[in-house]
Image (spheres, helix red, strand yellow):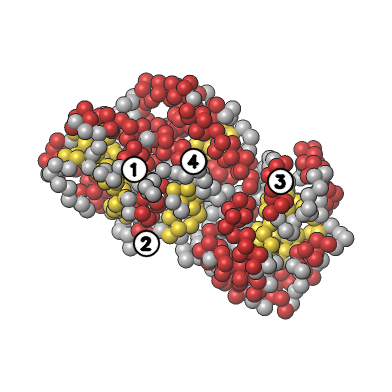
Amino acid sequence: MNRINQKLQEDKKLLSIYFTAGYPNIDNTSTIIQNLEKSGVDMIEIGLPFSDPLADGPTIQASSTQALKNGMTSQVLFKQIKDIRKSVSIPLIIMGYFNPMLQYGVEAFCKKCQEVGIDGLIIPDLPVDVYHSEYKSIFEKYGIINVFLITPQTSDERIHYIDSVSDGFIYMVSSASTTGAKVGFGDEQSEYFERIANMNLKNPQIIGFGISNNETFTQATKHAKGAIIGSAFVKHVTNNGIDTINTFVNTIL
Amino acid sequence: MKETYNINEKGYYGEFGGAYIPEMLYPNVEELRQNYLKIMAEPSFQEEFNALLKDYVGRPSPLYFAKRLSEKYNTKIYLKREDLNHTGAHKINNTIGQILMAKRLGKNRIIAETGAGQHGVATATVCALAGIECIVYMGEIDIARQAPNVARIKMLGAKVVPALSGSKTLKDATNEAIRDWINNPVDTHYIIGSAIGPHPYPDMVTKFQSIISEEIKWQLKEKEGKENPDYVVACIGGGSNAAGTYYHFLNNKDVGIIAVEAAGKGIHSGESAATSALGKEGIIHGCKTLLMQTPDGQITEPYSISAGLDYPGVGPLHSHLYKTGRGEFYSATDDEAMTAGLELCQLEGIIPAIESSHALAIFEHKTFKPDDVVVISLSGRGDKDLQNYIDYFKL
Ligand SMILES: Cc1ncc(COP(=O)(O)O)c(C=O)c1O
């Protein structure tokens, strides 16, 4: 069974952390992954940097720009994590934009993911219908789970469609925003979280965007299986480097 | 089967186009996709659009026979005078259409991106006209390069927000506008300035600009006794003036389609914006098309002396015209364009925008027959470029 599905069966709320590969330094990737696992994180999103990250706010944009300057590419990332499965067993997801994967070759990318032990992909600008008609069979061939986003504006009909195409979890974007734009949740979010929780979807939901501390993590996981922290973690790394990852994780859990 | 150059029902021209957008944008783009053709077909829309084009923009724009230029190049050259439009370029055809669209969709906030500032001015203008709030994203570097247009946008009551990310030019301004749209998913309409972006934008912008070729047909009939020229020529940034100039001739193979891109300091100089020559298929701003990128798929920064052609991609229609061979693609260097621009000033008394000067540089690259009728899109006037001309020619 895919490590993501296995993890989702555990009877606990999950914490997933996003970091930008190649940031702050080009060769931090493996260390960050290992430290996150040691700190008790449940799942990791490895951000593959892109020159034009449309869905990201200033924090992740800046880390991506720096990572690219440092020389990060798809090839470099795969080389860095080729032996990662010797040291960690945590589910690993690559989050990146579609163009770099398209240039690598979608099939070659999925194949490489399987080889190094990547369990899933999150590609914000690959729409579910294009995935469904053109790429689903390739992902399945290599056992790669593709994760789709929903937002407060996504219609029920489309959520059911996304649920039917998904085979892991649904990434619930907490509010209509880019990453790191809004912090904390209001009534609107609580309502939305409850609405989705009551839809009885086949895939569990993990909430992302706007989660930065214990309070927001607790709020999000009241209704969902887990929560994802991105910008707040990238900020922590910017300010404190990669040696105190457990301090950050301890403030959340 | 007859080959067609129109968009298909899925939003593709051949293999190019589509809507590669984050889910956050889906409701907005889908709303537009479901409604744009219906709204454009409404008689009240048509009436309002045509009245504004006539009385506000000043259409039809003249089709002018350039006698001395024709003599020099020994062929029959007509200039489609988009430079005489209100605000000085073809851009206003699209912004008039889109502001009427936005009103019918019930939107009360407009965002736009701009490079040279022409589209920013055209958007701020129609927002003033409609009394709607307007925010224009512009790269920090372009704000410094295009001070007069920044001032115009402000005078028209719009807010200019600097794009501070990436290379701080047009592509980053577009990113920022898209991010704004993600953060404001209900009340905002995004007026894209060229035939780019996710479906239905390329088609919608093309249809609003198609007034250019619609007029060329009857104007040419009056002047030459025939509707179809032998060639239509346009410069290509994202490709909106070109798309409008080609539109009604696309499926008529007797009309040659010629595109001129910006070669900057030369195609292989590393400082160029000649997308068809240097680009590879990929995704930019929600659209599958040709774009300039690294082997790893990172979008690269283009260069041209003309800020309006300084875009690393090209609209999907043009990628299709290039790939199928329906269009002939050329590129003009900075020097060729500047020389052609000055030549138009001195032969015809018309100061063109530097973007349009690229189209005029076609005569450096192709020789036409004496009885060929060649229509060139003179997409804009050169007022905005005066400082560039001054610096270049040491005037
Ligand atoms: C006068 C003029 N022509 C051409 C262009 C290029 O745009 P497009 O390729 O969309 O016509 C611009 C863009 O700013 C412009 O101002």
Residue at x 33%, y 62% (from the top left corner): B269
Q: Answer with left or right where residue B204 lies relative to residue A197.
A: left
Give the foreground label among 1 and 2.
Answer: 1
Per the image, the residue denoted by label 1 is B250
Residue A210: x %, y % from top left: 73, 48
**Who is closer to the viewer here, A35 or A84?**
A84
| Chain on which label 4 sits | B
- Give whichever of discs 1 and 4 has the lower sequence position: 4
Residue A133: x %, y % from top left: 59, 55
Residue at x 79%, y 59% (from the top left corner): A15
| Chain on which label 3 sits | A
Give the foreground label among 4 and 2.
Answer: 4
Q: Are marks 4 and 2 in contact (CB under 8 Å)?
A: no
Per the image, the residue denoted by label 4 is B201
Element class at badge 2: loop
Label 3 crowding class (10 Å Cα cut-off): few <14, some 14-19, many 20+?
some
Would the CB of label 1 be found within 8 Å of ligand 1? Answer: no
Q: Answer with left or right where residue B11 lies relative to residue B378.
A: right
Label 4 crowding class (10 Å Cα cut-off): few <14, some 14-19, many 20+?
many
Q: Tell me the amino acid under the disc marked 1.
A: Leu
For residue B270, which numbered disc appears in the image?
A: 2
Q: Are marks 4 and 3 in contact (CB under 8 Å)?
A: no
User: Is there any visible trace of residue B349 in the rendered image?
Assistant: no
What distance separates the C-alpha of mark 3 from that of mark 1?
40 Å
- Give whichever of discs 1 and 2 has the lower sequence position: 1
Label 2 crowding class (10 Å Cα cut-off): few <14, some 14-19, many 20+?
some
Per the image, the residue denoted by label 3 is A159
